[in-house]
Image: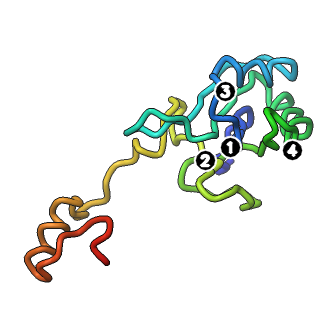
């Protein structure tokens, strides 16, 4: 139908960083049968980013989860719960707080934003830094005024 929405997958944001995947599943299990849970982590540090995805067996469960759980507090944090969209596409409402994106991977395997491929002809940080040092005499990076 041209839609990139997965009818059974929801985005859950503003999660407590102490929450485990099992904990996330436990929050949503009373709503319907869950077939997948993923907490997104920073790929370089392994630290949780405070959001994840839950995939239900039936679309009705995803709809119920959104209506029942959006704004519900978990450890003092109001959850953001909405339908997940395919990576690179915007949801109808763009009200996710900074750093949270309700995008799910293009394929059905779970992934994080770090799995995207680099753009063609894009220079590495090292190449850009070497080029800047040659042209300006300054090193690129934090605190160098660039």
Which numbered disc, 4 or 2, marks the residue that appears first in the sequence? 4
First in sequence: mark 2 or mark 1? 1
Which of discs 3 and 1 lies nearer the camera? The answer is 3
Residue 146 in view (yes/no): no
Image point (74%, 37%), residue name: 7
Q: Nearer the viewer, mark 3 or mark 4?
A: 3
Where, by quadrant of the figure, is residue 64 drawn?
A: top right
Residue at the extreme front of the image, as rendered: 143
Residue 71: mark = 4
Asked if marks 2 and 3 touch (Cβ < 8 Å), the reply is: no
Could you give the CA–CA distance between mark 4 and mark 1, rounded to whole angstroms? 16 Å
Nearer the viewer's eye, disc 4 or disc 2?
4
Whole-angstrom CA distance, mark 3 to mark 1, is 20 Å
Residue at 8 percent of width and 76 percent of height:
134
Point 44% across, 33% down: residue: 46
Dot 2 and dot 1 residues touching (CB under 8 Å): yes
Label 3, residues with CA under 10 Å away: few <14, some 14-19, many ≥20: some
Marker disc for residue 103: 2
How far, Cα to Cα, is label 4 from label 2? 19 Å
Which secondary structure, mark 4? loop
Q: Residue at x 82, y 43 (%)?
A: 78
Tag 3–tag 4 contact (CB < 8 Å): no
Residue 41 position within the rendered picture, expressed as x and y whole percent measured from the top left: 50, 36
Task: Compare marks 3 and 4 and give the one earlier in the sequence.
Answer: 3
How many other residues sit within 10 Å of disc 4, few (<14), some (14-19) or many (≥20)?
some
Q: What element carries label 3?
A: loop
Where is 81 relative to 64, above or below? below
Question: Residue under circle 1?
Answer: 84
Residue at mark 3 to residue at mark 4: CA–CA distance: 17 Å
Q: Tag 1's secondary structure? A: loop
What distance separates the C-alpha of mark 2 from that of mark 1?
5 Å
For label 3, the residue is 19
């Amino acid at each position: 139908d041209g839609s990139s929405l997965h009818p059974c997958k929801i985005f859950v944001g503003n999660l407590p960083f102490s929450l485990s995947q099992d904990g996330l599943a436990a929050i949503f299990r009373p709503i319907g049968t869950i077939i997948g849970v993923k907490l997104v982590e920073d790929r370089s540090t392994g630290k949780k980013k405070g959001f994840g995805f839950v995939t239900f067996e039936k679309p009705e469960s995803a709809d119920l989860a959104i209506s029942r759980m959006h704004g519900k507090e978990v450890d003092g944090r109001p959850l953001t719960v909405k339908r997940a969209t395919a990576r690179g596409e915007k949801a109808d409402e763009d009200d996710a707080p900074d750093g949270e994106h309700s995008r799910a991977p293009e394929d059905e395997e779970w992934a994080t934003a770090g799995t995207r491929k680099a753009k063609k002809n894009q220079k590495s940080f090292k190449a850009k830094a070497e080029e800047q040092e040659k042209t300006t005499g300054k090193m690129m990076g934090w605190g160098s005024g660039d």
